[in-house]
């Protein structure tokens, strides 16, 4: 926001202002060796231009200033007596709320007790899962008493089959899990903590994994640190370990260790860490720590300015991660429904969550006017199994109050026709009826002849008691989507007094049913996902003829082989610690695969990689300790591998999780 205001003051046009503001807002997350000046040049801005130069200088000047005043959503302060006698207060924006005017660090300096409550979407998922399990499985699951070391959970983690699980579902976590090979709870604590900028930049990840696998001996930067680092094989992974290292090797006092802890928790703490580094070197020099050990310890400690976990935090997150893994492994339907009902959250789009659940054997049913509720629900599926019914919340454009009215009216007795639906739920707008018809939600309403005309006929039939007469009568036939669209138009358009008394034809609609590809497009347009075949399944035969391998086939391909693969991009990542590399996650009907894009390949194909939804990749397969990726050498649109016919599935409105 500050960058945009600076740009406005310098009279930049809108397009330039957008480019500059976007550049400045994201630069701090880039590689630590990168500079804002270099990024300006790479973006095509000439810093010799006086206004560009002034913008650059002003942005540097305000970079470390507070961006805005804000309050912790779950923060509290506690003191003896009246709070306003200790610290100045002010009314918050929300009525009835009061905030402390001091910064949280100032409160800590004054000895005021402060409590930060962390809100997590996964907690709501776990709660909703337990409610569904209680309702449909007639079981009580106590999260505090989950079976320890469940073999199914650990087998799943070792295979990195973790879509939807808390904290361990990202591409980076999935690439680490097979190498870490967790077998007990503390391994999950380590897994949660190790994929963070601090351990990565501090060069702690590979040494820990090598030692974990027995391929490297356990050594310590200094013998005095063995009690601190023994549990993590000589590699510091947690904030508490770094603080103890500073106190042991550099003689830090409790106050100096607290200053170091605050630097860890401060977003832009590199400058503060440089000041602390001087104290560390002086202390280690006094204590006779060898120069090589000093450098190793300094790297470990200062890298945590880029963010690392306290062990207590990692252990708490690991408990939630284990609970989410346990519920997904043993109560897939309930966990998936809860996950879909609490979106947006997590790493993957709902379409990926649905496809992952289907690959694990869960039957997912589409939005249906006769069965769906606002949230996703569960339905009996024979042999004591359960299927998942998509909720009205996934019909994009349908209002919740309208959906609730549909459910309420449906509870009285079934809808006899689309005209009956439109009459009994007057909240339904025409565009909402069209939406429901296009996604197939009206197909099962039937095509009963008792209500042949529009709303006027429906009103007359209601007066004559027709609804009571048809209550409980099974539907005679199913509509297809274009039948339903035809009926919607017939219902919504009044014939007028001249033609109203003319009987309508009993002939079905003249519209041909949608093709499978057209239904796919309608699904993505109307709900953002499909419960039918994955888009890639429609082109698998063509791709197979073109020598394109599926995600499952990549797992069976030897290391070092040149391969062609294709898929729908579900995630793009460019971590600040990756030196310009971009990592793609591709999904097809068989699973998820990974691709590595080097900076030069990205530069040559930037627009295609960042905007194309379905891509064809060629490169060398890397199979390192069960972690499979394609090191990309060529990128192309997927349609290059086949000749598009009437409908191209690559136009499906799929969404990816980009650079979050």
Image (tube, grey):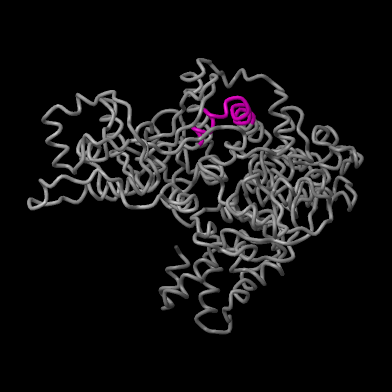
Which residues, given as a range, are shown in magenta?
Answer: 322-339
Q: Main secondary structure of the magenta part?
A: helix
Magenta stretch contains residue 335: yes
Residue found at x 73% / y 62%: 618
* Residue 193 higher or lower than 131, as above or below: below
Q: Is residue 214 left or right of residue 38?
A: right
Q: Position of residue 376 (x, y in %)?
A: 44, 34
- The N terminus: image quadrant: bottom left
Magenta stretch contains residue 160: no
Count every numbered label the image shows and give the total. 0
Q: Position of residue 537 (x, y in %)?
A: 60, 49
Q: Position of residue 518 (x, y in %)?
A: 46, 53
* Residue 524 higher or lower than 33, as above or below: above
Extreme left residue here? 497
* Residue 328 higher or lower than 605, as above or below: above
Taking depth in this image into account, of 55 and 199 the one nearest to the observer is 199
Q: Position of residue 288 (x, y in %)?
A: 89, 47
Q: Is residue 90 left or right of residue 592?
A: left
Snapshot quadrant of residue 323: top right
């Amino acid at each position: 926001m500050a960058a945009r205001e600076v740009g406005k003051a310098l009279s930049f046009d809108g397009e330039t202002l957008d480019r500059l503001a976007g550049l400045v807002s994201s630069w701090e997350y880039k590689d630590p060796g990168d500079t804002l000046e270099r990024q300006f040049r790479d973006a095509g801005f000439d810093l010799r231009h006086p206004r560009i130069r002034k913008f650059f200088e002003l942005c540097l000047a305000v970079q470390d200033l507070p961006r805005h005043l804000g309050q912790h959503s779950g923060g509290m302060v506690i003191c003896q007596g009246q709070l306003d006698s200790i610290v100045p207060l002010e009314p918050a924006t929300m009525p009835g709320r009061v905030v402390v005017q001091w910064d949280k660090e100032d409160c800590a300096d004054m000895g005021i007790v402060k409590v930060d409550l962390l809100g997590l979407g996964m907690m709501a998922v776990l709660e909703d899962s337990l409610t569904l399990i209680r309702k449909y499985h007639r079981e009580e699951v106590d999260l505090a008493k989950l079976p320890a070391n469940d073999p199914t959970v650990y087998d799943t983690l070792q295979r990195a089959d973790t879509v939807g699980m808390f904290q361990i579902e990202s591409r980076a976590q999935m690439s680490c899990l097979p190498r870490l090979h967790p077998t007990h709870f503390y391994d999950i604590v380590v897994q949660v903590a190790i994929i963070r900028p601090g351990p990565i930049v501090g060069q702690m990840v590979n040494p820990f994994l090598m030692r974990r696998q027995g391929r490297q001996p356990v050594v310590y930067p200094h013998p005095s640190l063995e009690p601190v680092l023994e549990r993590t094989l000589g590699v510091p992974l947690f904030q508490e370990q770094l603080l103890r290292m500073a106190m042991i090797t550099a003689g830090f006092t409790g106050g100096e260790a607290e200053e170091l802890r605050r630097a860890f928790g401060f977003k832009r703490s590199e400058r503060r860490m440089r000041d602390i580094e001087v104290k560390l070197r002086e202390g280690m020099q006094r204590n006779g720590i060898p120069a090589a050990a000093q450098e190793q310890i300094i790297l470990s400690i200062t890298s945590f300015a880029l963010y690392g976990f306290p062990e207590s935090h990692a252990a708490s997150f690991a408990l939630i991660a284990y609970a989410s893994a346990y519920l997904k492994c043993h109560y897939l339907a309930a966990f998936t429904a809860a996950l879909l009902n609490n979106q947006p959250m997590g790493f993957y789009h709902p379409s990926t969550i649905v496809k992952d659940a289907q690959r694990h054997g869960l039957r997912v049913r589409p939005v249906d006017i006769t069965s769906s509720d606002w949230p996703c629900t569960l339905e009996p599926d024979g042999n004591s199994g359960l299927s998942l019914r998509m909720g009205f919340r996934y019909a994009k454009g349908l209002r919740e109050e309208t959906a609730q009215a549909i459910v309420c009216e449906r509870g009285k007795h079934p809808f006899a026709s689309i005209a009956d639906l439109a009459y009994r739920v007057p909240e339904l707008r025409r565009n909402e009826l069209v939406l429901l018809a296009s996604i197939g939600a009206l197909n099962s309403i039937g095509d009963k002849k008792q209500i042949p005309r529009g709303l006027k006929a429906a009103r007359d039939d209601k007066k004559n008691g027709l609804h009571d007469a048809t209550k409980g009568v099974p539907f005679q036939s199913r509509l297809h989507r274009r039948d339903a669209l035809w009926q919607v138009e017939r219902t919504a358009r009044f014939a007028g007094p001249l033609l109203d008394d003319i009987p309508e034809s009993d002939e079905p609609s003249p519209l041909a049913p949608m093709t499978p590809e057209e239904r796919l497009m309608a699904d993505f347009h109307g709900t953002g996902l499909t419960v039918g075949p994955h888009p890639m399944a429609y082109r698998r035969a063509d791709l197979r003829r073109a020598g394109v391998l599926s995600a499952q086939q990549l797992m069976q391909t030897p290391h070092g082989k040149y391969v062609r693969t294709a898929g729908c991009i579900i995630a793009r990542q460019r971590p600040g610690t990756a030196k310009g590399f971009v990592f793609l996650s591709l999904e097809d009907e068989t699973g998820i695969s990974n691709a590595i894009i080097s900076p030069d390949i990205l530069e040559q194909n930037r627009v295609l990689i960042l905007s194309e939804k379905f891509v064809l990749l060629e490169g060398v397969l890397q199979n390192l300790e069960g972690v499979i990726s394609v090191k990309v050498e060529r990128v192309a649109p997927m349609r290059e591998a086949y000749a598009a016919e009437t409908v191209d599935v690559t136009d499906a409105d799929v969404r990816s999780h980009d650079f979050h």
